[in-house]
Amino acid sequence: MKRDMLYKGRLNFLLFSPINLITMKLTVLLLTIGCLQVSATVFSQDISMSERNAPLEKVLRTIGKQSGYFVLYNNELLQQARPVTVEVKGVPLEEALELCFAGQPLNYHLMDKTILIKPRKLSEAKTQATPVAVEVSGKVQDAKGEALPGVSIALKGTSFGTITDGQGNYALSVPEAAGTLVFSYVGYALQEIAISGRTNIDVTLHPLAQSLSEVVVSALGIEKSARSITYATQNVSGEEITRVREANFLNSMAGKAAGVVITKGGGGPGSSSRVLLRGNKSIMGNNQPLYVIDGVPMNNAMGAQGASLYGAQDFGDAISNLNPEDIESVQILRGPSAAALYGSQAANGVILITTKGGRKGIARIDFTSSAIFENPIGLPQVQTIYGQNNPSVNDSWGSKITNGSDAHLKDFFDTGQNYMNTLSISNGNDLGQFYVSYANTKAKGIVPENDLTKHNLNLRGTTQLLNDKLSLDASVNYINQKVYNRPQAGFNFSPIFALYSFPTGDDFSKYSGSNFEVWNPVRLMYTQNWPYIRNETLSTQNPYWKNLRSAPTS
């Protein structure tokens, strides 16, 4: 049964009188005997709370609930109390009370399971030096002037402490304006600074003289020192991946890891990328590595792939759907021993992907926006000296011409565009951490009428139980992607073949733009405007007709 541990009301007696004090003690004793019942409830003697300029009544209520003590006081008496600023974690009851009543015109008295609030005697105030609680604040930064979040600040020799926020600011309530503050941060030299009556202390931390040993993530997410492993591995940070953002984050890793060959797909935005670790392992089989996301192996399922001489289309793969901003780091395990724990499915190597999550004591809101533009390179060099033998055949092996032009090759392609906006929120404490993000991607390919729209929603939560011996990690990803008019390869279905084989002696503007189709009065419909239905080897179609009238959606 829950009992309110805080008793309020008017006590009609003088606390200075010895007789009244004895009467009050007996009253408290009788109340305790009459109200307490046999119970299995066990109250903690350690107090943890964080209050800033809070009424003393609120602080006493918190202490009473955590300790199981009754708090007895006079309403009019508490009106004289000053606001309390206190931040403690796991300190004894008396230490917490001393901090709360420091500098107060009131005092306390512990009697059995009761905290009695009384005025502080004048003689006691004169003879006893009462420490005054002081709030010390400031900012912690590095040598470059950048804020350092998560720096630990502690009052030396006590249990008082705090950490800096996302902007490097801190505020710590100490019993008195004396003592020494200890500032510590991973990778930086520890600093001890005397308070000496100051209320604002700004600190600049300097890196340690010796560099930290590199830590890599091995199989099953086990972290090891880079010097202790015996196989080839390499790490690519999330900052490197997002330096140049693409719809498929694998394309951003090209050239950033030794022994890794990444070939960008030719199917426009959303197409799959070919990744080889130390070359091909199989002539006929699959040479793609195994992907492991946060310790979970992932089948990089590819969409329906059409592959033939006359038509081939790339419908993308699963790994290309990840949001680059959600990636913390990528670890590449190339050696057979590195991938041994994942079995035969890791015969071509393993790519370990670690995603972002919340951190203890750090609240962050990040927004990133990027825009990328691209143009085709390496266009074929076609001859413009000789014209056609037959006006109805698109060859270029006839007599010499003077009006030859290859401008249609460059004019056909658009400027590729890639816009990505990401918003992420993360926070955490000792109980748990969370990370949530949303990304919107809009991309337009260099082939006309090819575009992609993608929405990514990611939610990840972590917690530690049993004194950090058990960790729980759960994540949910929602991805909605729509691609219009994926470019195709091959003779029949690719607009590129007809574009490259177009006679340089003809005027391409007669068949481009809005001239790609004409009204057929016999069939009562629009048909493609293209005189070169017959090539030397096979038929072709107007490239614009292929894009505007035969565009699939996936």
Image (tube, helix red, strand yellow):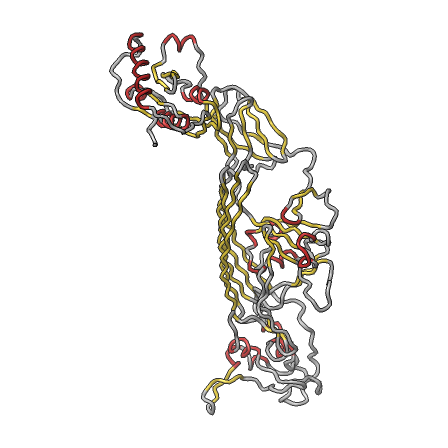
What x and y, as percent, mark residue 34?
30, 21
User: Which residue occupies the foreground of this view, 493 or 108?
Assistant: 108
The residue drawn where x is 26% and y is 13% is: 13
Q: Give the vertical position of 15 relative to 213 (above or below).
A: above
Left or right, 358 with respect to 109, comes to right
The residue drawn where x is 62% and y is 89% is: 392
The residue drawn where x is 60% and y is 61% is: 300
Q: Residue furthest bottom?
A: 522
Q: Give the vertical position of 171 relative to 309 (above or below).
A: above
How many marks are shown on the rendered structure? 0
Q: Give the vertical position of 534 relative to 220 (above or below).
A: below
Query: From where the camera sits, is residue 54 visible?
Result: no
What x and y, as percent, mark residue 365?
48, 45
User: Which residue occupies the foreground of this view, 233 or 21?
Assistant: 21
The residue drawn where x is 61% and y is 72% is: 410
Left or right, 532 with respect to 128, comes to right
Q: Indicate the quadrant containing the N terminus: top left, top right, bottom left or bottom right.
A: top left
What x and y, as percent, mark residue 443?
53, 63
User: Which residue occupies the foreground of this view, 405 or 182?
Assistant: 182
Q: Residue furthest right?
A: 230
Query: From where the camera sits, is residue 348 visible?
Result: yes
Q: Residue furthest left?
A: 12
User: Which residue occupies the foreground of this view, 178 or 553?
Assistant: 553
| Image quadrant in which you'd find residue 524 | bottom left
Q: Give the vertical position of 86 relative to 240 (above or below).
A: above
| Image quadrant in which you'd find residue 492 | bottom right
What x and y, as percent, mark residue 232?
73, 50
